[in-house]
Amino acid sequence: MSIPATSGIFDLLVIGAGPTGLACAIEAQRAGFSAVLVDKGCLCNSLFNYPAHMTFFTTPELLEIGDMPFSSPNQKPNRNEALEYYRKVTEHYQLDVRQYETVDSVSGTDGNFIVHTTDRFARQSQLRARKLVVATGYYDLPNYLEVVGEDLHKVKHYYHEPHPFYGLDVVVIGGKNSAAIAALDLWRHGARVTLVHRGAEMHRHVKYWILPDINNRIKNAEITAYFNSNLTSISADDVTIATPQGVVTIPNHFVFALTGYHPDFSFIESLGVQLDRANDRRPVCDPATLESNVPGIYLAGVIVAGERTNEIFIENGRFHGKLIAGHLSSQLNGNGSGDQALNEEVLQMEKHLRNQE
């Protein structure tokens, strides 16, 4: 049951309505606090932008939030199942989610933050909250190649489905899961695929059932691969690649630059949160409570790890809500302690999950 704000001010406002953000709002409501979520896209926007037929690397129970079972007939659920699950969780807890609301800035201080937003029709509004959680993820900001022609419409930083590229010359840049999945899917649906990767081979963390598949397609020359290579320029009709054997130019219709993504560090810093530049730009926060150096502003999900985006996933980020809710109890209820036992339990679980990665 959604808990309404009193006196026009929410106890907690969560920026980002992905799985971790949802978990934060759920745990706050379960602790008796009013909560609202704001997202510049749709519910679980990052998951929505995953490839249409993507399969998770993990099992359903490790994606669960709010103690709601994730039932799936598959050992590893797919994107559509996850979206359905998180919709049902949102509905069950009657979460207040403000979709397509971009947070422009935050003013005020601990106990009385003012969040300034703009909707997709350029209408501005404000929301007030005693505490904030930043759970914005990292999937919205791609790592750019910074080469000539990258601004052409033919260059894509996200891959969704193969049909529009049937019969065309497509270059996929990258050597991890996203690149391998896209290259295989495009090839199987009739595209002529060239893969370019700066490493000597596909990354060792490519999913174990995908790695032999992509390696065999390359071995059989069904997918052309340039390793230890970099794309140097893009034009309307071709691309240029620097390879160990020299520079080559090949015909091209579309480029998928699947070279990773990064958190919105500028937005985080605009809130006054400090980044540890000597430690992969990790935001400064208390690991026991996830409160940042700015009183009343908490961090959750992958942004806690800074540039090391491979350290935190849904599987461990989903527990951040319990840490934050425990501290909210001590701050807003004034009991001075929070749920220390719960905090210790969650921290130990996070350490265990990280050791398994």
Image (cartoon, helix red, strand yellow):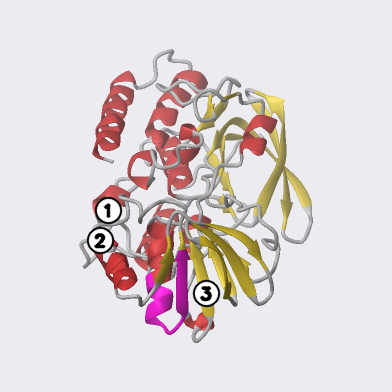
| Crowd band around label 1 with a 10 angstrom C-alpha radius: few (<14), some (14–19), many (20+) | some
Residue 32 belongs to magenta span: no
Q: On the image, which quarter does residue 131 sit in?
A: top right
Q: Which residue is mark 1?
A: 58
Q: Is residue 92 visible?
A: yes
Specify the segment rendered in magenta. Answer: 184-195
Task: Say what secondary structure mark 2 lies in.
Answer: loop
Quadrant that contains the C terminus: top left
Would you name the residue on which mark 2 appears? 76
Q: Which amino acid is tagged 1?
A: Thr
Looking at this rendering, what residue extends furthest in the front direction? 245
Residue 170's disc is 3
**Residue in front for this viewpoint, 241 or 90:** 241
Furthest residue to the top? 336
The answer to which image quadrant residue 201 occupies is bottom left
**Residue drawn 31% across the image and 27% down it:** 347
Please give the name of the residue rendered at 69% of the width and 74% of the height, measured from the top-left corner.
Answer: 236
Disc 3 versus disc 2: nearer the observer: 3
Please report whichever mark, 3 or 2, sits nearer to the chain's N-terminal start.
2
Q: Residue at x 54, y 44 (%)?
A: 262
Check residue 47 in the rendering and tell me which mark sits there, or answer none: none
Mark 2 nearby-residue class (10 Å; few <14, some 14–19, many ≥20): few
Q: Secondary structure at mark 3?
A: strand
- Mark 3 and mark 2: Cα distance apart in space: 29 Å
Residue 22 image position (x, y, % from top left): 46, 46
User: Are the residues at dot 1 and dot 2 in contact (C-beta closer than 8 Å)?
Assistant: yes
Give the mark nearer the N terminus: 3 vs 1: 1
Q: Position of residue 21 (x, y in %)?
A: 48, 44
Q: CA distance from mark 1 to mark 2?
A: 6 Å
Sequence-earlier tag: 1 or 2:
1
Q: Secondary structure at mark 1?
A: loop
* Alpha carbon distance from label 3 to label 1: 30 Å
